[in-house]
Image (cartoon, rainbow, N blue to C red):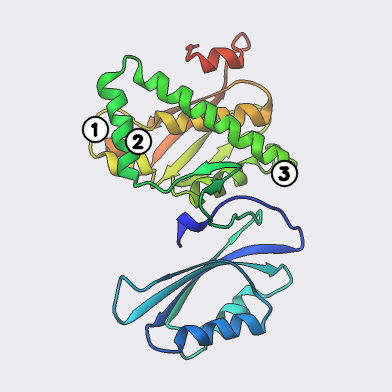
Amino acid sequence: MVQDLCMFAGWDEATEIVWFKIHYPAGKGNLASILNFLEERDVEIKIGHIDNTESEDVGYYSIFTRIKKDVDLEKFTQELKALGPVKDIEYGISKYNMIYSVDFPMNVIGVRAIIARAKTLVDIIKTFYENAPHAEGLLIQSGLKGGIEAAKYFENIMSLDMNNAGDMISELFFAIGWGRLDIECDCETMIGRVIVRDSFIADVWGDTEQPICAFISGYLAGYFTQVTGRPIQVREVRCKATGHEVCEHVISPAPETMKLEHLMRGERS
């Protein structure tokens, strides 16, 4: 999947956004056959990306499409795969139908965005840890602000509560390449955990003795704080960079005496 092309915006109950990564022989006319097939079936292509750099023999056509929900995607994919030029297909569904066109400047959930190497961002985070007192607290506060703003954006375009908030933040993390989330949380008590697979911070960091995904903890805390309307704490208890298979962040309510402004100042319970 070309994750840098998946941006969030829009909503349509009658359709769903489906991404395809189509592998095809990099010969003359092969891509045209695929495009003709999609046009004949009234598939609306929102974003497309062609990559012939990995191999001289095989090209990759990655697209985000808007398709009516009554379309049998399994059957559709098999028909597409049956075309002579198609070698293989990967596909997935964006449950909440939200993408944004890739123009310059790019826009992700309502603000200017850039595409950056994960190592560049991790180097910035490492600089915090090496030079700033209370670096972990600063990163948590930075994440808090980002998570709150993300939830506010989603609230402006649809009804957001704990019934769909987990799916929304999972789609966002996957789309922007931050990681894959598995969320287990009681909606009433707000006690639970988030498993982050392939965290961009932990994957790039290298071996370390302490969990280093404080920014992600803060982002999740800010997001769920905004959704629930009460201060929520999140802390990382396992990190892939310390040798674990995945990163694990524990969710819990902040003490009743703690307000959002206390979280934003980095105060501890």
**Amino acid on which disc 2 is placed:** Cys
Vertical order, 257 against 116 (above or below): above
Q: Which mark is residue 157?
A: 3
Gap between marks 1 and 3 measured at Cα: 40 Å
Judging depth in this view, the residue of 116 and 73 nearest the camera is 116
Residue position marked by numbered label 1 in the rendering: 208
Provide the secondary structure element on which disc 1 rests. Answer: loop
Farthest residue, direction left? 207
Q: CA distance from mark 1 to mark 2?
A: 9 Å
User: Is residue 25 in view?
Assistant: yes
Disc number for residue 239: 2
Which mark is on residue 3? Answer: none
The tag earlier along the polypeptide, 1 or 2, is 1
Mark 1 belongs to which amino acid?
A: Thr
On the image, the x and y values in percent for residue 244 come to 32, 40
Q: CA distance from mark 3 to mark 2?
A: 34 Å
Total count of labels = 3
Task: Name the element at disc 2.
Answer: loop
Callout 3 amino acid: Ile
Any part of residue 244 in sight: no
Going from the N terminus, do you reach mark 3 or mark 2 first? 3
Task: Specify few, some or many for label 3: CA neighbours under 10 Å numbering under 14, 14-19, or 20 or more.
Answer: few
Residue under the image location 24 percent in, 40 percent down: 206
Where is residue 197 shown, x and y percent of the image? 41, 46
Does the CB distance between marks 1 and 3 fall below 8 Å? no
